[in-house]
Amino acid sequence: MLANINRGGPGLGTIQPAQGDYFQTTKGGGHGDYHLLVLAPYNVQEMADFVKLGFDLAFKYRNPVMILADGALGQMMEKVELPPQLPRENKEYPWATTGKPKNGERRIITSLHIQPEKMEEINLRLQRKYKQMEAEEVRYQTKNLEDAEYVFTAFGLVSRIALKAMDIGRQKGYKIGWIRPITLYPFPKKIYAEIAPKVKGILDIEMNAGQMVEDVMLSVQGKTRVEFYGRMGGVVPTPDEILENFEKMFIKGE
């Protein structure tokens, strides 16, 4: 179980919020064909809730889970309802590296196998696990897709700002919907594929140079226009500037 509270980069960077670690978290950061389960909270309540959920998923799949948040959420004060304390479990896990059981085999976790056939077998098993995750663990939130002609999409803190921008846009007469991926892996591809033929375009908003937008583009499969608006280095976009850029990209050019 890991937590990554993004700040502006690259390198030493700043302590201000950013979302530049999307690629690192969902696409790479290590060796081999692997995936982390990635949860993207958009408020402090979810940051707390996702700790338990993350451990539950990690134990279910025996797979690393990352909470991907940002410097604003990491420093924000909001009301949080904590769950009741759970009783401590004294459960034995056959895979846990807690030492050699009496009259049992040594417990070893390793991915080092010299024989390529053995490594392929392990990789195929992992791919089956990832397929199960994609079937069972996709999480997302939507609003106003029923009559939407356009869609704002964002993850984490920026999804809250995009939601406000959607509300302002609707007051101006624009039929805008909203999609928030909660799991960045597995990515909610199907909801984008379903909405793509029904809308004129999707605006992806992030605090980076454009990372999740690539997954949005892959998901819509060319069936609608996808544009990107982002701020970097710790600058947080405002609802008004999101709407202003939406109008420049989609409305004034029509």
Image (cartoon, rainbow, N blue to C red):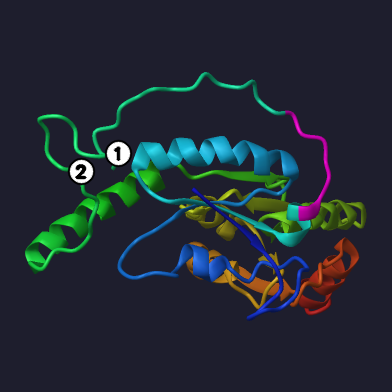
Q: Secondary structure at mark 1?
A: loop
- Badge 2 density bin: few <14, some 14–19, many ≥20, Cα 10 Å: some
| Disc 2 target residue | 107
Quadrant in the rendering for residue 166: bottom right
| Disc 1 target residue | 98
| Residue 37 visible at all | yes
* Kind of residue at disc 1: Thr
Percent x, y of residue 43: 74, 46
| Range covered by the magenta-colored residues | 75-81
* Nearest the eye: 108 or 220: 108
Q: Is residue 78 magenta?
A: yes
Mark 2 vs 1, N-terminal side: 1
| Left/right of residue 204 with respect to residue 243 in the rendered view | left
Vertical side of 52 occupied by 249: above or below: below
Are the residues flagged by discs 2 and 1 in contact, CB closer than 8 Å? yes
Q: Main secondary structure of the magenta part?
A: loop
Percent x, y of residue 189: 49, 55
* Kind of residue at disc 2: Arg
Q: Secondary structure at mark 2?
A: loop
Percent x, y of residue 22: 57, 66
Question: Separation of disc 2 and disc 1 at Cα?
Answer: 8 Å
Q: Is residue 247 magenta?
A: no
| Left/right of residue 103 with respect to residue 254 in the rendered view | left
> Quarter holding the C terminus?
bottom right
| Residue 175 visible at all | no
Quadrant in the rendering for residue 239: bottom right
Vertical side of 162 occupied by 215: above or below: below
Name the mark on residue 31: none
